[in-house]
Amino acid sequence: MRSILNYVGGKFEEGDGKDKYDVYNPAFGKKISVVREARREEVNRAVDFAHDAQLKWQRVPISDRIKYLFKLENLMWDKLDKIAEVTTMEHGKTFEESKGDVVRAIQNVESAAAASYQIMGRNNRQIASGIDEELVRVPIGVFAVISPFNFPIMIPFWFVPYAVTLGNAVVIKPSEKTPMSIEMVMSLVKEAGYPEGVIEQVNGGREAVDYILENKKVAGVSFVGSTPVAEYVYKKGTSSRKRVQGGASAKNYVLVMPDADLEGSINNIIGSFYGNAGERCLAGSVLVTFPENHDRVLKIFKKRASELRLGYGMEKSTDMGPLIRKDHMERVERYIDSGEREGGKLVLDGRNSRSRKYPKGFFLGPSIVDGVSEDMTVMKEEIFGPVASFYTANSFDEAVDVINSSRYGNASSIYTASGLLAKNFTERVDAGNIGINIGVAAPIAFYPFSGLKDSFFGDLHPQGGDDNVFFFTERKVLIYKW
Ligand code: NAD
């Protein structure tokens, strides 16, 4: 079986570590390639290449560095369908969802071009007699990007275009579960003519991450994944004075007020819970209603959820793909079990709706657990699958308290016709991305992808705006007198 290639020093090469992780087509339940765990020497060699390349790259004028971005952008548009097909094959999401993943990556390439102009300095003449002062932003060195499985292209591209255009070099370590999409993009990086070593890919899992964190030439790490790993990467990285930004796990609440336009919003609400098969850090997980609208919301939600068709993401009829792995599917099933065992009412059981056409695929249909309470596991833990838990609150204040009792703070949404309630919600809810009549509160490329509490480690968030410019550059203040 072919192994995923590293891209180091401008060349594709097979890793020389041991075969360690299988890559599957999760819809077919079939192995399609293998990932070798990078050895420490391989990681160090990639970082050395990146380090040497960066010393030259930082001297390339910014206006020229941006030209590579435009070339890469054009190539990604040209290959959009092809990349999306690879993503659907290795991840399972529908073709349209995969295209969305690539398009948001391209938007980050565009946004990086604009953000880079922000590194122009600030000048102050005559801060004292005959003395001028100037602030300039300079690149830092080699950054590592360590990404999760659920958005194989978009998430690395929250960082890569900014880091390199600002004059740094980047080593990407994609998820060992979905490394093929980014491997394909490396061939576009090569075609765009990026100097050797400026953008690289190494493969592997936990050990490769440790080798990256232990390499002194790596100046910073952009990480996205689960909270325990984000915390580990943050602590280990910052202890050797690396910069670290770490996106982490989530538990997102969607509040449907009695005055919401339910019919007009239902598809959007369903998309929040079951889009990307629930494997989305912005996915709705707990749906909060009130005694006066609970039955109506549950009825229409259940009807729409039951209509979702499971299948292979490349087939037009498919609304929802499989989960990433069998063991993850079984983990989500255990959450459904616990919902019932701990007192919830299972009104829709996804375990009954597998794909008949793909019996070996890791399919799990949409589930609904009604009547959940605060102490239940399904209310507290991230499930990362197609399960909606219905919680009934007796007041808006209670709903806000329940949302804020979560250890996570990635996203939250409210559906309402009241501007005042919506304003209240944005002010009181402790979540970094807030949707108003929008169930997936995903910021566009030139806004930071926020996230609070245990959903984020660090200070500067992924994506555009000031955050990435600040993360990938250092400030120098020049004071001079002639
Ligand atoms: P994960 O934490 O298992 O893996 C993420 C990365 O860390 C991978 O590259 C993996 O190889 C590496 N890794 C895994 N275990 C490690 C260990 N013990 N030591 C060092 N490195 C290790 O996450 P996942 O399952 O790929 O992705 C799902 C998680 O990511 C969910 O919790 C989801 O909420 C989160 N996520 C967060 C955001 C965000 O922006 N906050 C976005 C997407 C996904």
Image (spheres, rainbow, N blue to C red):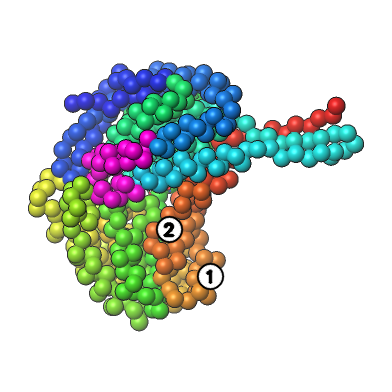
Number of numbered tags placed on the structure image: 2
Q: Position of residue 73 (x, y in %)?
A: 42, 38
Visible in this render: residue 5?
A: yes
Q: Does the residue labelled 2 lie within 8 Å of ligand 1?
A: no
**Location of the C terminus (image quadrant):** top right
Q: Which amino acid does label 1 sit on?
A: Lys
- Membership of 442 in magenta stretch: no
Q: Position of residue 429 (x, y in %)?
A: 50, 64
> Which residue sits at x=33%, y=21%?
12
Q: What residue type is labelled 2?
A: Ala
> Which residue sits at x=46%, y=22%?
195
> Which residue sits at x=78%, y=36%?
133
Looking at the rendering, the quadrant in which ligand 1 lies is top left
Left/right of residue 3 with respect to residue 415 in the rendered view: left
> Which residue sits at x=18%, y=45%?
27
First of labels 1, 2 by sequence position: 1
> Outermost residue, bottom direction?
292
Q: Is mark 1 on a helix, strand or loop?
A: helix
Q: Name the residue under label 2.
A: 441
Viewer-proximal residue among 425 and 321 = 321
Q: Which image quadrant for residue 90?
A: top left
Magenta segment, prevailing SS (helix, strand or loop): helix
**Location of the N terminus (image quadrant):** top left
Left/right of residue 39 with respect to residue 362 in the rendered view: right
Image vertical order of residue 215 relative to residue 300, above or below: above
- Membership of 87 in magenta stretch: yes
Q: What element carries label 2?
A: loop
Q: Which span of residues is magenta-colored?
A: 75-100
User: Badge 1, how many Cα within 10 Å: few under 14, some, many 20+?
Assistant: few
User: Badge 2, how many Cα within 10 Å: few under 14, some, many 20+?
Assistant: many
Q: Position of residue 288 (x, y in %)?
A: 37, 70
Q: Name the residue under label 1.
A: 423
